[in-house]
Amino acid sequence: MNLARAAHLAAATGALLALGWTARHGLAQPGVALAYGVLIAVGEAVRHRPGAPGDARESAPVGAAGSLAYALLGEVGGHPATHGVPQVVAVVLGATLAGAGGRPPAPDRLVRRVAGTALAALCFQPLHHAGPCPYYVLSLLLLLGLTAVSDAALAAALARSRAGGRYTAALRTELRALPGIGPAICATGVTAALAPAVAGLWVLPLCCLPLLVVQLSAGRRGSARSTCGRTVASLARATELAGCTPAGHAGRVAGLSRAVGRELGMTESGLSVVEYAALMHDVGQLSLVDPVPAGATEPLPPEERRRLARLGGAVARLAPLEGADAAEVAAAVERQADPYREQPLAARVVRTVNAYEDLACGAGHGPAAALELLRRAVAAGSHDHEPRVVEALARVLARDAPERAEA
């Protein structure tokens, strides 16, 4: 967590300096600051919470667009804007917190908002003070690209610091997400920065209305994702209530499988497939008259394991999934009993993590002994577990061991 703490400390220091500078020198053009502050606050007030696991995308696009617009504001009603970078940071921070009310944004998102706004304002001020330029629009577009890429790099670094895995994989995930809501935020921000130069501040609501509609729609989609997640979690819980698996088994396998998948560089959609497959990999055991001891299916005959896997896959095809391809999830569940060379990567991850969980908790070997048993099986030429998945699991366990010891 060192990088995350450092980023939070740097952002907090910069924000305090900006607030102090603004308080000392006074608020330039308070009416303009109030108009953009209200826009940002409204965007925060109606923000939605991401519903799918791992969905950390911008949940307040109107607030983000308003922050960007204020950072890029050069003229209002024919008069030049006179606010500086410290005031931009102070107004954006104050409006974000005011709009959040009793639902403060996550620290990482607040850090990204402050850092992105400060970078955009710092880069824009020289362009603004340079006077008329034939390449003004092109310069703005380049500035937007720089801000977006820098934000993705910071988001990847924060995600890497908290969840582990490779930075390059986290960065690829963030960069792939840029074509989503990012262009709409940038377009709205530029429009809300340029339009008041001629039309005045009254045009701000019209500039942001389309993005607000998108934000409200995203909120409903987030609720649908949350409902899907609860439904899948209920299916996983059913195996525990029926006595087929130990309490919390599916959740532990899902969490560890996601970490291993991230260590292997899987995309966000791939991680969703892994997580859903891990939650549902034991659903086929509901067909057993006599539950398997501790829910461990490895001792069963191969054909019986394949039958249970096929049943679980059939249920997965019917489950309401959001953020993942149901066919991919079903395939990952159906192929649990196959040799790893015939499995998709998601199935390999879930099978290895499930075997580790069975050995460490169900069989009582403990974490170190369970991992050593998996390594011995790989060394002996077992076709059940892919070596690189086992080693990715080992790295995740080694990295998380100090945190578990502190807990």
Image (tube, helix red, strand yellow):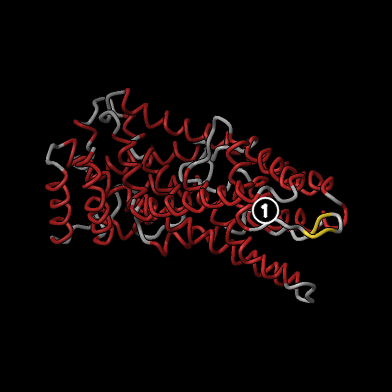
- The one of 277 and 191 positioned closer to us in this rendering: 191
Residue 235 quadrant = top left
Residue 405 quadrant = top left
- Looking at the image, which residue is at 76% across and 53% down? 192
Label 1 sits on what residue type? Ile
Measuring from the top left, give residue 327's x and y in whole percent.
49, 47
The 10 Å Cα crowd at callout 1, few under 14, some 14 to 19, many 20 or more, is many
Reading the image, the residue beneath label 1 is 185
- The one of 320 and 113 positioned closer to us in this rendering: 113
Residue 38 quadrant = top right
Measuring from the top left, give residue 140's x and y in whole percent.
70, 67
- The one of 235 and 394 positioned closer to us in this rendering: 394
Measuring from the top left, give residue 186's x and y in whole percent.
68, 57
In this image, 378 relative to 193: left or right? Answer: left
- The one of 174 and 40 positioned closer to us in this rendering: 40
In this image, 293 relative to 280: left or right? Answer: left
Regarding residue 188, the answer to whether it shows in the image is: yes
- Looking at the image, which residue is at 31% across and 60% down? 341
Q: How many marks?
A: 1
Regarding residue 217, the answer to whether it shows in the image is: no
On-image quarter of the C terminus: top left
Measuring from the top left, give residue 106's x and y in whole percent.
49, 42
- Looking at the image, which residue is at 46% across and 42% down? 53
In this image, 273 relative to 249: left or right? Answer: right
In this image, 144 relative to 49: left or right? Answer: right
Q: Quick one: which residue is furthest to the bottom in this view? A: 134
Secondary element at tag 1: helix
Q: Quick one: which residue is furthest to the front in this view? A: 24
- Looking at the image, which residue is at 70% across and 59% down? 72
Compared with 305, 155 (above or below) is below
